[in-house]
C-alpha cells in the first residue's frame, strides 16, 4: 500500500488536467472528450518531462510487493489466487484489462516531435518506449496474447474490434521499444535523478527480465510459435545482462560495506535507494508524507500477520553451503536450533536469535501474534526513528523500494545460461557466488557438485511437498540451486509468483503453508536470550502464569499445530484451498464485458464458455 499526500517532485497530477485526457483509465477506444491545444503543448523539454512523469507512478510498482503472497510467504488472509479453485472467477470488468496509460504513451509518441529540442524528443521518446515495453510485459504475463496498439484510437477505429495479437508479435514489438530505449537513454552517471529515473541500465534490466520470462515460459509450457524460439529469448536475456554487467551502460555493483551480517538487511531498510545496486527504485519521503506500510504490515497484528513458510525456510543452506535438510532430525528441529549457522540472509530477512530493531538494543523475539508462521519478516522494516512523523515507529514507512536491482540481473544471467546449457563455473562465480560472498557464506556454488548431486528437497518429482516440478537435463542440479538462490535473494520483491508461472510450477502454492515446529506444551525461548517468549499449554490444563510477560496460548484454541498436540504452526489449516488449476491458472481471464464489446476477443483456456471448454 502506498499513501500519498504530496508529491511535487516525481509525479505531477496537474499534467493530466492540462492534457484533458479521458477520465476513464480503462478506455482503449475513445479520444479525449476535452482536448488541449496541442499546438500549445509539447513545445519544450519541460513539457515532455512533465507528460512522461505520469508513467512512473502508473507503470512501475508503487509499493506493496512486500505484501504479496506465494509459496514462500503468506499473510493472515490468503488471496484468491493462493486459494485457487472456485475462489477465482471471471470479472465483468477490470481485472487488469486496462489500457488508459497506453493511450497516454501513444499520445506522447504521436506529438512529441513537435518539440524543437530534438535531444529532449529522443530522450523522452526513449522513456516512453521503455514504459510501453514494461506495460506490455505486465499484460503478457497476465493474459498471454493481447492487442498491440501503437497509436491513438478513435471511437470508430476498426482496431477496437481486432483480435488479440500473438505473444510472439507482442514480444517482437517490445524488443523494438526496449532496444531503442537502451541506445537513447542516459547512463546513470549522466542522469542526476538516478535511480528514480529510467536509464539505459534500467532498460537493460527490463530486457533481461522479460526475455528470461518469455524464454522459460515457452520452454516449460512447451510453446512453439512462428518466429523465435525459447532459446532466442534466453540468449537475449544473457546478452542484456552481460551488457549491464560490463559497465558500458552505467556502473553497478552489489551493495557491500564489508559487514556481511547486516549489509543485506540494511540495503532494504535504508531511506535512500543505494545507487550502486538499485537500478530503478520508487522514491518515498517522510517529510512530504509519501509513505508505504512495510513496517505496519510486519509489526501490527491487524495489518497482515506475514510469515515465511517452513518449506521455504528449510531451503536456506547452512553458512558453509551444506544443506539444512541433510541434518539428522531437521524435520522436528525447533526455531532456536534451526536458525543457527544458516545462510546469513535468513536472519537478515526474518527475526532470528538476538534480533533487535535497527537503531535499538532491545532483543525482540518472533511475535506469533503478528506472524502466521512465526518466521516473522524484517525485510523492508526501517529504522525505528524513521517512523512517520504522524504515526509511531511501527506504522508507515518511507524507505525507498526497489523496482530493479543488480542482484536480479546476476540471477537472470545465471539462470538463462543454465537453461541454455552454456553456463560455466566462471559465470557462477560472477553471479551466484557474488551474492553469497556479500553475506559472508563460506560455501560457494560448484556447478559440478550441484549437477552430480541434485538436492532432492528441491526436486518436486521426489519431494512433491517442497520441490520444483519438471526440471530435467544435465543441468538439473545447478538449475535447482539457482532457483534456490533466486527465491532467497529476491524474497518479498514481487518476483516469486511470476517465477512459478514461467516455470510451470503453479502447484507449488498447494504445498504446506506451515511454520515453526513445537513439540508440545512447554516454555520456548525464541530470541536466544535465555528467557521464555512463549508458553504453550494443553487443553484441560490450567493456564500458566507469565512472570516475564510471555505469550501464553492454549494448543488447539489459541494456536493450531499440524499434529494436534504437537507439530508445525498451522494457521491456515481450515483455509478453503481448492488447488491450483493447471489448465486455467497460469493466465488470468479476460473480463466478460470486454468480450461482449469485442466478440473477436477470445477467453483464456479454462475460464468459461467463451473459452470453448
Image (cartoon, grey):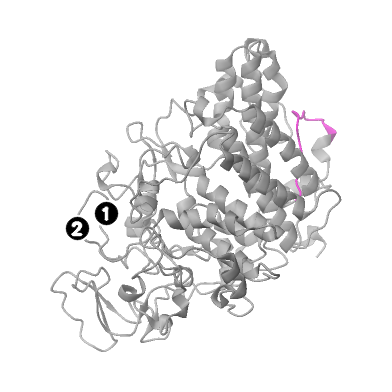
User: Depth check: 534 or 505 in front?
Assistant: 505
Please check the rendered image and state whether residue 548 is part of the magenta-colored stretch, yes or no.
Answer: no
User: Depth check: 418 or 412 in front?
Assistant: 418
Q: Over which residues does the magenta segment extend?
A: 145-158
Mark 2 touches mark 1? (CB < 8 Å) = yes
**241 lies above or below 531:** above
Look at mark 2 in the image and give the residue it sits on.
362
The quadrant in which residue 276 appears is: top left
| Element at label 2 | loop
What is the number of the mark on residue 357?
1
| Element at label 1 | loop
Please check the rendered image and state whether residue 152 is part of the magenta-colored stretch, yes or no.
Answer: yes
Task: Indicate the position of residue 76 as horizontal and vertical percent values.
Answer: 43, 64
Residue 194 as seen in the image, left or right of residue 144: left
Q: Residue furthest left?
A: 547
Q: Main secondary structure of the magenta part?
A: loop
Q: Of callouts 2 and 1, which one flags the residue occurring earlier in the amino acid sequence?
A: 1
Distance from disc 2 to disc 1, alpha carbons, whole Å, reads 8 Å
Task: Indicate the position of residue 33 as horizontal and vertical percent values.
Answer: 68, 24
Residue 171 as seen in the image, left or right of residue 96: right
**162 lies above or below 356:** above
User: Depth check: 579 or 492 in front?
Assistant: 492
Amino acid at each position: 500500500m502506498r499513501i500519498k499526500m504530496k508529491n511535487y517532485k516525481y509525479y505531477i497530477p496537474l499534467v493530466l488536467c492540462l492534457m484533458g485526457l479521458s477520465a476513464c483509465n480503462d478506455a482503449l477506444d475513445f479520444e479525449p472528450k476535452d482536448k488541449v491545444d496541442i499546438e500549445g503543448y509539447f513545445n519544450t523539454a519541460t513539457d515532455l518531462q512533465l507528460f512522461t512523469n505520469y508513467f512512473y507512478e502508473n507503470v512501475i510498482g508503487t509499493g506493496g510487493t512486500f505484501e504479496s503472497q506465494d509459496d514462500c510467504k503468506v499473510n493472515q488472509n490468503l488471496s484468491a489466487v493462493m486459494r485457487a479453485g472456485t475462489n477465482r472467477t471471471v470479472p465483468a470488468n477490470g481485472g487488469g484489462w486496462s489500457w488508459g496509460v497506453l493511450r497516454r504513451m501513444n499520445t506522447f509518441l504521436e506529438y512529441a516531435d513537435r518539440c524543437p529540442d530534438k535531444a529532449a524528443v529522443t530522450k523522452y521518446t526513449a522513456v516512453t518506449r521503455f514504459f510501453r515495453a514494461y506495460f506490455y510485459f505486465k499484460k503478457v504475463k497476465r493474459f498471454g496474447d493481447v492487442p498491440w496498439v501503437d497509436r491513438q484510437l478513435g471511437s470508430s477505429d476498426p482496431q477496437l474490434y481486432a483480435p488479440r495479437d500473438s505473444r510472439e508479435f507482442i514480444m517482437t514489438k517490445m524488443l523494438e521499444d526496449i532496444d531503442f530505449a537502451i541506445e537513447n537513454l542516459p547512463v546513470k552517471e549522466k542522469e542526476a535523478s538516478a535511480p528514480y529515473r529510467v536509464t539505459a541500465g534500467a532498460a537493460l534490466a527490463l530486457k533481461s527480465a522479460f526475455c528470461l520470462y518469455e524464454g522459460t515460459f515457452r520452454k516449460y509450457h512447451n510453446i512453439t510459435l512462428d518466429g523465435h524460439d525459447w532459446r532466442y529469448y534466453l540468449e537475449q536475456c544473457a546478452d542484456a545482462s552481460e551488457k549491464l554487467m560490463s559497465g558500458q551502460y552505467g556502473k553497478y555493483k552489489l551493495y557491500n560495506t564489508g559487514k556481511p551480517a547486516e549489509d543485506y538487511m540494511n540495503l532494504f531498510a535504508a531511506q535512500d535507494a543505494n545507487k550502486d545496486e538499485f537500478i530503478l527504485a520508487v522514491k518515498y519521503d517522510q517529510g512530504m508524507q509519501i509513505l508505504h506500510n512495510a513496517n505496519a504490515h510486519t509489526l501490527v497484528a491487524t495489518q497482515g500477520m506475514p510469515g515465511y513458510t517452513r518449506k521455504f525456510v528449510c531451503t536456506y543452506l547452512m553458512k558453509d553451503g551444506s544443506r539444512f535438510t541433510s541434518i539428522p532430525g531437521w524435520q522436528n528441529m525447533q526455531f532456536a536450533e534451526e536458525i543457527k549457522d544458516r545462510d546469513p540472509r535468513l536472519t537478515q530477512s526474518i527475526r532470528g536469535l538476538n534480533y533487535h530493531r535497527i537503531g535499538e538494543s532491545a532483543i525482540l523475539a518472533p511475535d506469533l501474534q503478528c506472524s502466521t508462521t512465526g518466521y516473522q519478516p524484517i525485510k523492508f522494516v526501517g529504522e525505528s526513528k524513521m517512523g512517520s512523523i504522524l504515526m509511531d515507529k511501527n506504522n508507515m514507512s518511507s524507505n525507498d523500494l526497489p523496482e530493479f536491482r543488480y542482484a536480479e540481473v546476476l540471477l537472470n544471467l545465471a539462470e538463462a545460461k543454465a537453461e541454455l546449457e552454456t553456463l560455466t563455473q566462471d559465470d557462477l562465480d560472477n553471479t551466484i557466488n557474488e551474492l553469497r560472498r556479500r553475506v559472508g557464506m563460506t560455501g560457494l556454488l560448484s556447478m559440478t557438485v550441484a549437477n552430480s548431486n541434485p538436492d532432492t528437497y528441491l526436486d518436486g518429482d521426489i519431494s512433491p511437498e517442497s520441490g520444483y516440478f519438471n526440471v530435467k537435463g544435465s543441468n538439473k542440479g545447478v538449475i535447482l540451486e539457482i532457483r534456490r538462490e533466486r527465491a532467497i535473494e529476491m524474497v518479498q520483491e514481487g518476483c516469486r509468483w511470476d517465477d512459478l508461472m514461467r516455470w510451470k510450477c503453479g502447484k507449488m502454492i498447494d504445498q504446506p503453508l506451515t511454520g515453526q515446529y513445537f513439540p508440545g506444551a512447554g516454555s520456548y525461548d525464541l530470541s536466544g536470550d535465555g528467557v521464555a517468549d512463549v508458553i504453550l499449554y494443553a487443553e484441560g490444563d490450567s493456564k500458566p502464569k507469565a512472570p516475564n510477560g510471555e505469550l501464553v496460548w492454549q494448543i488447539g484454541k489459541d494456536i493450531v499445530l499440524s499434529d494436534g498436540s504437537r507439530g508445525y504452526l498451522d494457521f491456515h489449516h481450515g483455509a478453503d484451498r481448492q488447488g491450483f488449476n493447471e489448465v486455467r491458472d497460469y493466465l488470468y481471464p479476460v473480463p466478460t464485458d470486454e468480450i461482449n464489446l469485442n466478440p473477436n476477443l477470445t477467453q483464456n483456456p479454462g475460464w468459461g464458455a467463451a473459452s470453448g471448454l
